[in-house]
Image: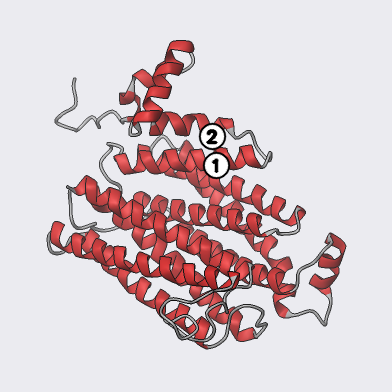
Amino acid sequence: MRERFAAFAWSVLGLNILVVIWGAFVRASKSGAGCGESWPLCNGELLPKAPALPTIIEFTHRVTSGLALLVLIALVVWAFRLFPKGHIVRRVSAWSAAFMVVECLIGAALVLLGHVAENPALARGYTLSVHLVNTMFLLGSLALTAWWAGRDEGALGPARPVQKPLFGVAVALLLVAMVVGAIAALGDTLYTATTHAEGLRANFAQDSHPFVRMRILHPILAAAAGVCLFGLGLRAALATTETFLVRVLGAAVAGLTIVQILLGALNIVLLVPIYMQLIHLFFADLVWLALVLFAAESMWPQAARVPAGMKIAWGVMLCLTGITGIIMPIMPGWIFLIPGLLILSEYVPALKRLVEWLREKMPKHIAWQKRPEAWEVPPEPHDPAARP
C-alpha cells in the first residue's frame, strides 16, 4: 500500500511541475490577463464563452491548478489514513497542503493586483519572487512526501551534522539565482531584445527598467550556485564513505547542474525564446528537487535498498535529459536516453519487450540488464541478514 501511495505522490509532484511550466508559459505569452481581473471566475464567468487564445491559456492554467489542489487534498487525506500519528510523511504532506494554499492566494493576488501580462510595476517583481520561492517549497515538500513514504521509521531523529552549512549555502544560492532568473525572464518578456548587442546595451543603460538591468546578475549568480552545487554533488558521489543513495543523488545534482548551465548558455545564445525558457525552468526544477532529496538523504539516510520510486524518477530524468539532447544538439542525448530506457523497462512492459528484443540482437552490450540486483546495495557488515 505504501508503494502505491509513493507512486501517487510522485504523480502529484509531476502534475504540479506541469502546472508550474504552464504558468511560466502564461507569463511568457503575456496571457496572464486572459481572464481579466476576476478570480476565481474567468471574466466573470464560470466557463468563458468564445474565448480568445490568451483566455484559453490562462483558463487552462486555472483549471490545472484546481486539479492539482484536488489531488493534493486526496494525497494528504491518504497520508493521514495510511501512516501512524507522528510519522514524517504526515508532516511533510501537511506542509505541502499549506504551501498549496499560499500558492493559490498568491495566484489570486497576481490577478487581482494586475501583476500580469505587460504590467512593468516593480511590485510585480516582489510578488513573482514570493511566488517562485513558495512554489519551490511546494515541490520540495511533495518530493519528500513521496521519498519518505517507504521509510520504516516514522521519526527522522537528529540530523547528521555533516555538510549541514554547505547545504544551507547551496539552497540559499540556488533560490536566489532562481528568483533573479525569474525576474530576468520577466524583463525578457516585457522588453524583448532582437539582437545580442541590443540586449547587452539595455543591460547597462541607466534608463533601462530594473528588470532588464537584473538580467546581467542571473548568469553570475547561476555560476556561483552551479560551482557550489557541482562541488557538493561531486564530492558526495566520489565519497566511498557515503551510502549508495547519497552518492547517486550527489551525482544527479552534479550532472543536472552541468546540463542546466549549458541550457542557460543556449537560452542566451538563442535570445531566450519561449520554448527555451520553459526547458530551462523545467531543468531548474529538477536541480532543485535533486538538491532537496540529496540534502534529506545526507542528513537522514534510509536503508540501503533502492526504492522503486527512485528508480522510476531517475529513469524518467535520464530519458528527459536524453530527449532534450536529441532535440537540441548541445550534448549527446543517447548517452542519457539509453540508460533511462533500460531502467524504466523494469516497470514498463512495452520497454521491457524492446529491451528483450535488443538483448537478442546485442547481448554483449546490455547483458548487465539481466542482473537487476546490480541496482541493490550489498548489506552492511553488521546487518543480521548479511551472509558471511
Q: Is residue 321 left or right of residue 88?
A: right
- Residue drawn at (55%, 42%), measured in percent from left and top? 321
Q: Is mark 2 on a helix, strand or loop?
A: helix
List the residue tagged with mark 1: 321
Of 186 and 84, the residue lying toward us: 186
Identified by mark 1, the residue type is Thr
Kindly tell me whether residue 77 is visible in this rendering: yes
Going by the image, does 307 lie left or right of 313? left
Q: In this view, does 274 lie above or below 239?
A: below
Q: How crowded is mark 2: few (under 14 residues within 10 Å), some or many (20 or more)?
A: many
Identify which residue is drawn at 49% across, 39% down: 318
Does residue 34 lie above or below 166 as drawn?
below
The mark that comes first in sequence, 1 or 2, is: 1
Residue 92, percent from left and from top: 28, 63
**Residue at 52% over, 67% down:** 23
Using the image, determine if residue 102 lies above or below residue 78: below
Which residue is more in the foreground, 259 or 300? 259
- Using a 10 Å C-alpha cutoff, classify the residue at mark 1 as few (fewer than 14 neighbours), some (14 to 19) or many (20 or more): many
- Of the residues shown, which amino acid type is indicated by label 2? Phe
Per the image, the residue denoted by label 2 is 336
Can residue 179 be seen at all in this image of the molecule?
no
Find residue 269 and name its label: none
Assign a secondary structure to mark 1.
Answer: helix
Instruction: State which quarter of the image contains the C terminus.
Output: top left
Q: How far apart are marks 1 and 2 (CA)?
A: 6 Å
Residue 194 percent across, percent down from the top left: 82, 64
Look at the image and name its color scheme.
Answer: secondary structure
- Residue 301: x %, y % from top left: 30, 47
Q: Contact (CB < 8 A) between labels 1 and 2?
A: yes
Residue 34, horizontal then vertical, whole percent: 56, 77
* Residue 243 vs residue 365, the one in the foreground: 365
